Amino acid sequence: MGRYALFLGCQIPMRYPNLEVASRKVFEKTGLETLDMLGYSCCPEPVNSRLLDRTALLTISARNLAIAEKLGLDILTLCNGCYETLFEASDTLNHDPSQLKTVNDILKKSGKSYLGRTKVRHFVEALYEDIGINHIKKLVTKPQKLRVALHPGCHLYREHEGEDTDRKPEMMKELTLAIGAEIVDYGLEKLCCGYPTMLVDEEFSLRQRLLPKLKAIRESRAHLVVVACPACMMQFEMGQTMLTKFGLKYNIPCVSIIELLALSFGVPPLELHLDFHKIPPLPLALVREDT
Amino acid sequence: MRNPENEGPQPLEQRLESAIVCSETSGERRFTFEIDSTSLRSAVETLKQKFPTLRFITISATDIGLDIEYLYHFDIDGKIISLRTFRPKEENVFESIIDIVPASGFIEREIVDLFGVKISNRPKEKSLLLTEDWPPEKHPLRRPLEGELPPKMRPVIEALITTSSVASISKFMFQRREKVGLPRTPPLALQDEQTLQEFQKVIRDTELDKKTGFDWKKKKLRY
């Protein structure tokens, strides 16, 4: 059974603590053991921050990797963005001695060092590979008979060069099927939700990225969107509110696969604090509860 | 008299001692020393005392967004020595060296005209380059106070540096965390002052604070 250093990131503890609650409940039910990373920082954010200064950003990531290394554990992330940043940092530092030395020269000034041993995993692959679909199916007491549109998110496609980029999105698909949901094919699964471009061009992000997805999802008659990343969730939730200023009204609920897993394992919806969502999926969950 | 031909960058560095932030050599006869702005005048004085053949060439200035970069160029028997220093645009002042190097008078007045900076250590004089009816608030080479970050990225970086998290930290959310049965503060570096300071030291040591234009006293970006 897997044992990991849990990297909560920024958005989950400070915006969506309900996802932290759901994750902890799912890990407890499945037996995936996690240890909190005391004193961690932002990964840092993978798209815009990364353009600033590669060495600085690698050093901040290395500080996080070093915390897990000291615990003797690999990192488990709950967010695609954190996964992308830390995956790249570990991939670089674990294989490039000169870059590792540069980073350590900076870290040692504050009494830290990174040996280059930490690996990084996304919760989707940890659940799929460490726990296994068969065991997850056995834990399902309340199948989620919903029509869902999956949005794996760009960084879930991140793999080592030459490896199958659909590996983790396929795992997400299988996890969704394992809990009894029906997956709709809306054709734009691989299109970015637009979150990273919000900081640069809000209208582009909303109209050129989020909107085509929402249109296709609505046409597919999915009950809700399922994501594996809090940033994508924020974009789907806030973005739909923001689209009203262009006269566009969408009200499609968005939940994380980890929340659906928790619901299917019999965690009562109220214990999952689904009221944190901007577009409440709670009525939908309660309907499922009754049926 | 000392033979300047034997004066490579090392002896000169020794003479300027603690004033030097860093140095670079871009050829056998070209040396640049970055000097802390508070030590600029004493560095020029040192050069003048130690090298009797010192000849002032010019000062070049560039508005680089948040600061103005000044390069003081000197010749010592065929070797070019440049002292580079930076002054924050919020201070908007640079120190005259006219009392040490009288030849700097004209170029200092040009810099005042072109960049709109004030000069200390010498009386204010009328414009050298600009016409009398030139609008006083406009200066041909002055740019707005701007750093590298686009507007929407600024709060993200401020939050990262001040709190170790890019999500905004609010009492409301701490309360809500407690309400859902989680620890009030997540295990981020911000959970205790000592860990936060250790994280912020990493930020300083990587110079991300300088690169982004972060003001530690005000705990926010300079722009």
Image (cartoon, coloured by chain):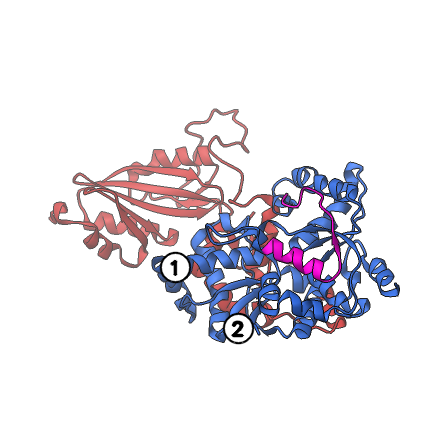
Chain colours: A blue, B red
Q: Between residues B53 and A56, which one lies in front from this camera angle?
A: A56
Residue A264: % across, % down: 76, 66
Chain of residue at mark 1: A
Q: Between residues A67 and B154, which one lies in front from this camera angle?
A: A67
Residue A97: % across, % down: 35, 60
Q: Between residues B188 and A239, which one lies in front from this camera angle?
A: A239
Number of the label disc, if any, that sits on residue A95: 1
Q: Determine the image quadrant of residue B196.
A: bottom right
Q: Residue drawn at (64%, 44%), measured in percent from left and top? A: A194
> Is A57 situated left or right of B56 in this image?
right
Q: Residue drawn at (53%, 31%), measured in percent from left and top? A: B138
Q: Is residue A228 visible?
A: no
Chain of residue at mark 2: B
Instruction: Look at mark 2 in the image and give the residue it sits on.
Output: B194
Q: Is residue A153 visible?
A: yes
Q: Amino acid at mark 2?
A: Gln
**Magenta region: which residues?**
A168-191
Q: Amino acid at mark 1?
A: His
Discs 1, 2: same chain: no
Q: Secondary structure at mark 1?
A: loop
> Is A263 situated left or right of B79 in this image?
right
Q: Determine the image quadrant of residue B137.
A: top right
Magenta span includes A188: yes
Q: Dot 1 surroundings within 10 Å: few (below 14), some, or many (20 or more)? A: few
Q: Residue drawn at (64%, 52%), measured in percent from left and top? A: A152
Residue B79 position (above or below residue B159): above
Discs 1, 2 touching: Cβ within 8 Å? no
Residue B107: % across, % down: 35, 34
Q: How many marks?
A: 2
Number of the label disc, if any, that sits on residue A245: none
Residue A121 position (above or below residue B92): below
